[in-house]
Image (tube, grey):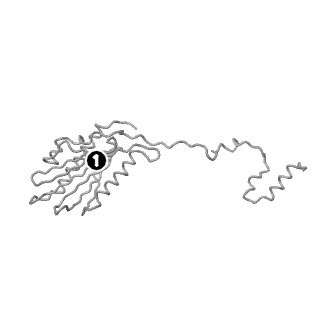
Amino acid sequence: MHRSAPRLARILACATVPMVLVAGCSSGSDEKDDKNTGGSARPGSPSASPTVAAAKFSKLPDVCTALSGKTVDQLVPKAQNKKGKALPSADTNTSASCLWTGLDGFKYRSLTVSLKLFRSDPGLGSGDRRAGEYAAQQASRAATGKVTDPKTEKVAGIGDGATSVSSKEKKDGDEFRNQTVVTRTANVVITVQYDGAGYEKEKTPDAAALLKDAKSAAKEAVGAIAKGSQSGT
């Protein structure tokens, strides 16, 4: 069959090209439009932005009102400030802590409730997932440092997941019992730190009793989040 001169020249040219480039020398139609290639995306075309689930809570309640006055009286008898001392925070809508301390005779008690809110972010993940990661970090921190004999356990029935850490610590010759309960409710993490000691001839407080009270405080704080936080994204 007679071939036109331009077509013959193209075939001869392709015969000298390395094999990795031969695909570009098809003997088919030379001017096919890109739309006939099946509509595959071109390099550099924009892609849809990732989405994450909206966070349940958008702000925190007043942390020093997370526990009732009755609970404070029970856990910290003769507290120096029954309303608690709000600890410094750059943004109390996302991070806040309140401290109560008291000395009843020679019985010392210290209670701290900390709240941490995580917003959903396409680049970082959902608020719930970020809160879960932070809760795990908080529990791990409670079992490190100067404490001894740390015991970590999962706790059921408090928020969306809780962990307790029991430990001992010696300060200025006195034996302390430390109890930490970390729980997550949706995108908010609650950390309750409850410590006790007996000065002079007072007995060292019972660790199991302290832990029971710390769990009770954490559960009450979960309820305060539900009542006092506003819903949003």
- Can you name the residue that lies furthest to the right here? 2
Q: Locate the C terminus by quadrant.
A: top left
Closer-to-camera residue (220/200): 200
Q: Quadrant of residue 68?
A: top left
Q: Is residue 225 above or below residue 205?
A: above
The crowd level at tag 1 (other Cα within 10 Å; few <14, some 14-19, many 20+) is many
Residue 43 drawn at (x, y percent)? 63, 47
Q: Residue drawn 16% across and 63% down?
A: 173
Q: Quadrant of residue 29?
A: top right
Residue 151 drawn at (x, y percent)? 26, 60
Q: Is residue 136 left or right of residue 220?
A: right
Q: Is residue 131 left or right of residue 109?
A: right
How many numbered dots are placed on residues in this image?
1
Residue 96 drawn at (x, y percent)? 30, 45
Q: Is residue 233 left or right of residue 213?
A: right
Give the labeled residue for mark 1: 114
Q: Is residue 108 left or right of residue 118?
A: left
As helix, strand or loop, the secondary structure at mark 1 comes to strand
Q: Residue drawn 8% across and 60% down?
A: 201
Residue 191 drawn at (x, y percent)? 28, 49
Q: Residue drawn 14% across and 59% down?
A: 204
Question: Which amino acid, by three-letter code, is at mark 1?
Answer: Ser
